[in-house]
């Protein structure tokens, strides 16, 4: 994600901020312009956006801003919705009479907004095409039932269900260890599940379907049986030669979702590094392969291997920085040539969608 700046004082401000930490001016995200803007009250509960490209347009706050301070996105005044472009996708939210649910939900919404920001940037609609049997993207944030029936995190025909327990760091870590995953985050969940949704938008019934099958495998093989086999037997021992993760070996759809999630981990962080001007120039003369300057990537239409050239040295440095803090590696994965080919395919499809 790119860095944002206050339109009043020029300070760095962040995607989740409600106010500039330097000049205290209010901030709001403008989904129509995909920008975080400084805002002024315009009376009657409306705001005037001060970002130059907003040309002083008027916006309404999202209903989740007023009630729970959970969302900093705004709604263009002519839009009749009371919820912003991200919050209106919710079908089920947690029971907010249970006070601890509010903070857990806040974490989920923050991760979700980052993913919706990515869809806006890619110009992928959240509304599907019901007349062509393509369901819209919707979210259910649910808790296990009192009778013990558990809520499975997953995707079904555009509907993404996330168990609220995933927002509790202790519970998420317990699940990560029991599933032997190197990495488990809310943003990772969002990227994985939303990738299932947009497979139907950008691959299914498009010119990319056959190339997808050649690279990822035939998705018509039994999905439920494949997952049962995976949970019974685990991934084949040589999964690292073909997949970004063990779970990706369970079925071509899961491979797509896992690969897409990695694609966004990579493209988002490279963009952030470029935006901050992060560059690597190791002191040792033999470490030239470890140099990086993500700013040198002209734009995200650059071929993926060029983006990866900048990313790999960054991961070595960032992993080592994390170790210096006693933290887990930022990116605890090694990418095989087949996995890189799949990442390049995701890049190509998302940059030049089969539909649109
Ligand atoms: Zn400011
Ligand atoms: Zn909202
Ligand atoms: Zn999945």
Image: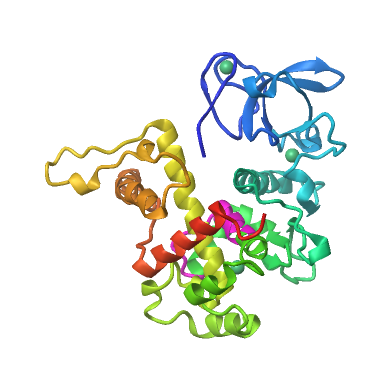
311 and 347: which one is in front? 347
170 and 41: which one is in front? 41
Which segment did they paint magenta?
A: 179-194
In reply to whether residue 184 is colored magenta, the answer given is: yes
Q: Where is 307 relative to 76, above or below?
A: below
Position in image of residue 44 (x %, y %): 87, 19
Position in image of residue 121 (x %, y %): 60, 43
Quarter-wise, where is residue 191 in the image? bottom right
Dividing the image into 4 quarters, which one contains the C terminus? bottom right
Residue 232 visible within the image: yes
Position in image of residue 10 (x %, y %): 52, 17
Q: Residue furthest left?
A: 285
261 and 325: which one is in front? 261
At x 65% / y 82%, what residue is drawn? 224
At x 59% / y 18%, what residue is drawn? 7
Quarter-wise, where is residue 54 in the image? top right
At x 63% / y 61%, what residue is drawn? 202
Left or right position of 290 against 353: left
Left or right position of 307 against 316: right
Left or right position of 216 against 44: left
In reply to whether residue 186 is colored magenta, the answer given is: yes
Residue 92 visible within the image: no
At x 78% / y 38%, what residue is drawn? 64
């Amino acid at each position: 994600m790119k860095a944002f700046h206050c339109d009043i004082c020029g300070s760095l401000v962040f995607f989740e901020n409600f106010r500039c930490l330097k000049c205290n001016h209010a901030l709001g995200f403008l989904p129509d312009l995909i920008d975080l803007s400084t805002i002024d009250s315009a009376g009657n509960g409306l705001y005037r956006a001060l970002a130059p490209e907003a040309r002083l347009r008027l916006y309404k706050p999202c209903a989740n801003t007023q009630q729970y301070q959970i969302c900093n996105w705004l709604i263009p005044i002519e839009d009749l919705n009371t919820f912003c472009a991200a919050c209106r996708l919710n079908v089920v939210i947690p029971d907010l009479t249970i006070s601890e649910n509010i903070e857990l939900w806040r974490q989920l919404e923050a991760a979700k907004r980052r993913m919706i920001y990515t869809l806006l940037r890619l110009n992928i609609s959240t509304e599907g095409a019901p007349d062509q049997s393509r369901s819209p993207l919707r979210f259910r944030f649910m808790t296990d039932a009192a009778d013990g029936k558990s809520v499975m995190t997953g995707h079904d025909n555009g509907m993404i269900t996330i168990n609220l327990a995933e927002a509790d760091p202790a519970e998420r870590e317990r699940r990560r260890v029991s599933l032997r995953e190197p990495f488990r985050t809310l943003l990772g969940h969002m990227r994985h599940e939303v990738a299932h949704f947009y497979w139907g938008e950008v691959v299914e019934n498009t010119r990319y379907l056959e190339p997808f099958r050649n690279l990822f495998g035939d998705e018509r093989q039994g999905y439920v049986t494949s997952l049962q086999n995976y949970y019974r037997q685990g991934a084949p021992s040589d999964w690292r030669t073909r997949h970004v993760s063990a779970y990706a070996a369970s079925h071509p759809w899961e491979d797509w979702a896992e690969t897409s999630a990695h694609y966004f981990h990579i493209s988002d962080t490279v963009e952030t590094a470029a935006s901050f001007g992060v560059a690597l120039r190791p002191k040792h003369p033999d470490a030239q392969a470890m140099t990086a300057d993500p700013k040198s990537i002209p734009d995200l239409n650059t071929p993926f291997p060029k983006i990866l050239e900048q990313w790999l040295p960054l991961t070595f440095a960032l992993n080592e920085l994390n170790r210096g803090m006693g933290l887990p590696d930022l990116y605890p994965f090694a990418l095989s040539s087949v996995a890189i080919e799949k990442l390049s395919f995701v890049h190509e499809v998302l940059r030049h969608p089969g539909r649109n």
